[in-house]
Amino acid sequence: MERRKFIERSTLSVFAAALGTEIVFGNYLPPGIPLLGLQDPDPFKMFNKDPDMVVLNDKPWNIEARAHLLDDAITPNKVLFIRNNGKIPENIDVANWELRFDGESVKNPKTYSLQELKSRFPHYTYQLTLECGGNGRSEFNPPAKGNQWTVGAVGCAEWTGVRLKDLLEDVGYQSDAVYIGYHAADQHLSGDPEKEPISRGIPMQKALQDETLVAFQMNGADIPLAHGYPLRLVAGGWPASVSGKWLNRLSIRNKVHDGEKMGGTSYRVPCTPVAPGEKVADEDMCIIESMPVKSLITYPKTGATLPLGRSLEFRGHAWAGELEVSKVYYSIDFGSSWQECRLEPPANRLAWQRFSGSVRFPKKGYYELWAKAEDSQGNSQPMVLPGWNPKGYLNNACHRIAIKIT
Ligand SMILES: Nc1nc2c(c(=O)[nH]1)N[C@H]1C(S)=C(S)[C@@H](COP(=O)(O)O)O[C@H]1N2
Ligand SMILES: [Mo]
């Protein structure tokens, strides 16, 4: 029998990981037959996620973390949020997976096999912060349609792959190239094969950064299925929607990429602030690029109690899109006074940074611990909601947790 007729081993191992056990006769599974077990109604088991995560939508799957789950420096798969616009591809034939380069500005269209990508180009590993542009959407008023993310659509996993710039150099492109658009193997919810759930991208200068990867590993193993197996674009510091999962084609464009969810109110905000609820003309909307400065208290969990006289050791992460975080402050008096936290440098550019502090409370009672980060250009997180926008993007308001001193 031809080997081709069977599902590739490494695909099986990803499915096996998702199912939490070996697929005993997996070698005999013909391609095109989806595994029943992958339609498991228990999303936590199916995606190998912590049961403390919160499902916001099941068609498509959208699952967020809670602040205290995100305490690790490198976000493990168990707690990394899932944001899907369409259906996760089910019949991944990794042996025949290809990445094609095309577009108006490509010198000559070129296709690489996954194997070629891995063997022909040097590998790089970076910790990269990916935050959904809609993280924090639930707080906007008037409310914005879409997944009602609170604070957990962010993570900083370790990604390994080849540099997009190395691939672009190898492919060759004309001097009029301005944008890279991605295309992927996930399917539109309507089932219409002509429609793409999402096809976004990045300008050339972001594509050519050292840290912009075409990745095949997350946290030292094959990328989990829900996060883009077997190949993913990863461009840290920008809305995670530009990091195309299940990547199979990159278009080198001579204009701003016009794929699905590049226009209208998708991942675009008013170029200048507007009043909440105001209608905004299409030409006054700008594409979101670098994400704004933000922080998250990951320890303790909100609602923690502590005896009077003990100091609270707290910690979290701060990030600032393309920039570095220069300071993080905390307050226990509702922002009336602020103290500086300890702050560590990032593991590499575009990785989030650990902050920590130690605080004593003056008497028994209810307190809130607030955190506020500032980036290297002096931009600071707002205390309350930042500028309203039609789809509720870019909420980088201060994070706060409740503490009771007994
Ligand atoms: N092919 C594809 N890529 C995609 C998406 C998608 O639906 N399909 N969602 C995007 C969005 S909006 C976000 S926020 C991130 C989420 O990545 P994660 O699910 O690995 O956390 O993937 C991006 N890449
Ligand atoms: Mo997103």
Image (cartoon, grey):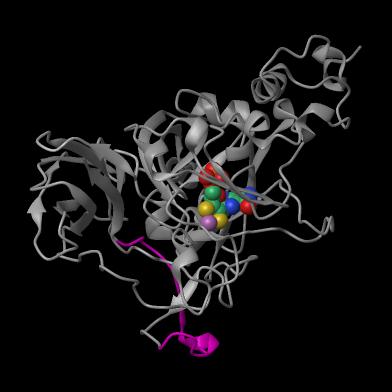
Q: Residue at left 84%, top 29%?
A: 36
Horizontally, is 386 left or right of 40 in the view?
Answer: left
Q: Nearer the viewer, residue 353 or 405?
A: 405
Q: Is residue 405 above or below residue 324?
A: above
* Residue 347 % position (x, y): 25, 35
* Residue depicted at 76% across the width and 31% down the height: 38
Q: Quadrant of the C terminus?
A: top left
- Left or right of 196 in this view: 262: left
Q: Quadrant of the N terminus?
A: top right
Q: Nearer the viewer, residue 279 or 161?
A: 279
Is residue 48 found inside the magenta-colored segment of the image?
A: no
- Does residue 291 show up magenta in the picture? yes
* Residue extent of the magenta highlight: 275-292
Q: Where does the image place residue 287, in percent across and percent down from the top left?
A: 46, 71
Corner quadrant of residue 51: top right
For residue 65, say whether it is visible: yes
- Dividing the picture into quadrants, the one containing residue 260 is bottom right
Left or right for 107, reference 72: right
Tally of marks: 0
Q: Position of residue 393 (x, y in %)?
A: 46, 68
The answer to which of 173 and 153 lies nearer the viewer is 153
Specify whether 39 is left or right of 133: right
Q: Could you tell me residue 237's position as x and y percent?
A: 36, 52
